Image: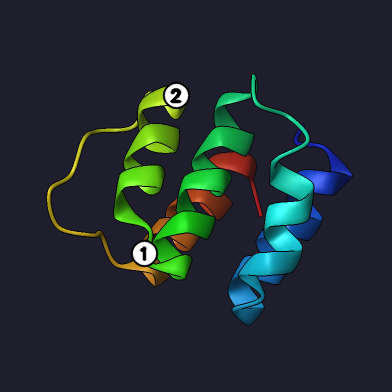
Amino acid sequence: MPSQDLRQAVVYLEKGEWQAAHEIVQEDEESRLFCWAHGIVHLMEGDLSNARYWYRKAGRPPFSEAPPVAGEIRALKAEIGL
């Protein structure tokens, strides 16, 4: 079961509040799911090189073009059972 913190970060991501989500996800740099959420934060910010770094840490497939943020949030939600 994902932590309440990760769930809250996803709520912020859905609202487009990437700065608030960033405050949460940067607290856990070891969790694959937190790293994925961290990558989504940087997609939303427009920092693709940083997003790629966090996607690699999360074990996510590499990308050259930014994946659609809404689709990434949906996939993360499905992964954590939201």
Is 38 or 33 nearer to us in this picture? Answer: 38
- Classify mark 2: helix, strand or loop: helix
* Contact, mark 1 vs mark 2 (Cβ under 8 Å): no
Residue 66, image x, y percentages: 23, 60
Amino acid on which the number 2 mark rests in the picture? Lys
Q: From this view, report whether residue 29 is shown above or below residue 65.
A: above
Residue 2, image x, y percentages: 75, 36
The residue located at (87%, 46%) in the rendering is 4
From the viewer's perspective, is 21 left or right of 45? Answer: right
Name the residue furthest left.
64
CA distance for labels 1 and 2: 19 Å
The residue where tag 1 is placed is 71
Q: From this view, report whether residue 57 is shown above or below residue 5.
A: above
The residue located at (78%, 35%) in the rendering is 27
From the viewer's perspective, is 34 left or right of 78? Answer: right
The residue located at (31%, 46%) in the rendering is 49
The residue where tag 2 is placed is 57
Amino acid on which the number 1 mark rests in the picture? Gly
- Classify mark 1: helix, strand or loop: helix
Q: Closer to the N terminus: mark 1 or mark 2?
A: 2
